[in-house]
Amino acid sequence: MNAENDPNLPFVHDLTPVRLRTLQQERARAAGLDVFFQEALSDGLTGPELAIIPAGVFTLGNPEAERGFGELAPRNVDIERAFAIGRYCVTADEFQRYAEACGHIWPDHLVRTEARQPVTNVSRADATGYLAWLSERSGQHYRLPTEAEWEYAARAGSASRYCFGDDLGCSEANTGSFQIVGRSVAGWRRFLPFCAPMNQALDVGMYPANIWGLHDVHGNVWEFTNDLWQGPADPNSPGKTGRWYVTKGGSWFESAWQARSCARKPRWFDELDVNLGFRVVREL
């Protein structure tokens, strides 16, 4: 990322959905890959499904009028190199293959997800162990996304609060509360809820993808990034600092407001939680 923005990179917020998809397709062809692909692994199986993300410039952060604790002031950021990112969070099934191969032991007291649910109750060290294993099995370099890469891929050219617009409904994400927008009913039906919180992480891919094909960038589970949290980690305890990392995306436990593209939350380096997982990046 450059302090000065590269004039040769497209400012993605100015591009139409058609142009954003075309940019993605052009970068995939240049890499000799499909827009969406899975890596062949040495055990004969395949890695997580990935999406090509083209290089570009975007505005990271949040205007001051809406800025919450720890949220960043808006600034234009260069994503100088294209990369591939998981279309979904790593699932329980995908992580279990690593656990069996490498002898990862689950503490008995932990709640575990299953099958296509995002793997949770894994620390950042567990995530990086999985990524090292995936890199070795694929012959490629897998890692956690930076905060800028995560937000750039999640926004997919959008400048609104969410990749779908400025409001988020229950048909678009799994969050702990919803913003029901543009719907009205008459009579007795108006007393019924349109939807209710699910109170757990759901299978990945149940909600619509953004323009670049990523699912669940709003809600379901918070996702680790590779960036250290700078400054206080708690608005009520300004001295609370240390090895905290930035997580993004919100979860089934928090409100839709916490799932905005700009929202961020500090999580301890070895924190375990039922609403915390991760998504992979594969370098091109």
Image: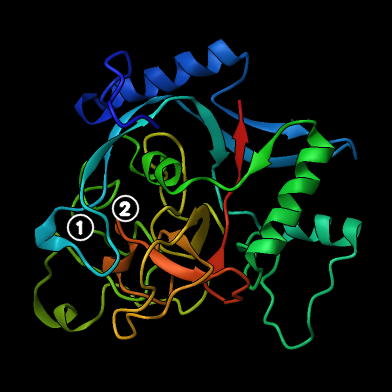
The residue that mark 1 highlights is: 167
Residue 54 position within the rendered picture, expressed as x and y whole percent measured from the top left: 44, 25
Mark 1 element type? loop
Q: Residue at x 67, y 40 (%)?
A: 142
Count neighbours of disc 2 (C-alpha within 10 A) and say few if under 14, some if 14 to 19, many if 20 or more. many
Marks 1, 2: nearer the viewer: 2
Q: Residue at x 52, y 72 (%)?
A: 275
Name which quarter of the figure residue 91 lies in.
bottom right
The residue that mark 2 highlights is: 261
* Colour scheme of the rendered structure: rainbow
Name which quarter of the figure residue 157 lies in.
top left
Mark 2 element type? loop
Residue 257 in the image: above or below residue 207: below
Residue 232 in the image: above or below residue 248: below
* Amino acid type, residue under disc 2 in the picture: Ser
Residue 159 position within the rendered picture, expressed as x and y whole percent measured from the top left: 21, 41
Q: Residue furthest bottom?
A: 109
Give the side of residue 199 with respect to residue 260, left or right.
Answer: right
Q: Is residue 94 visible?
A: no
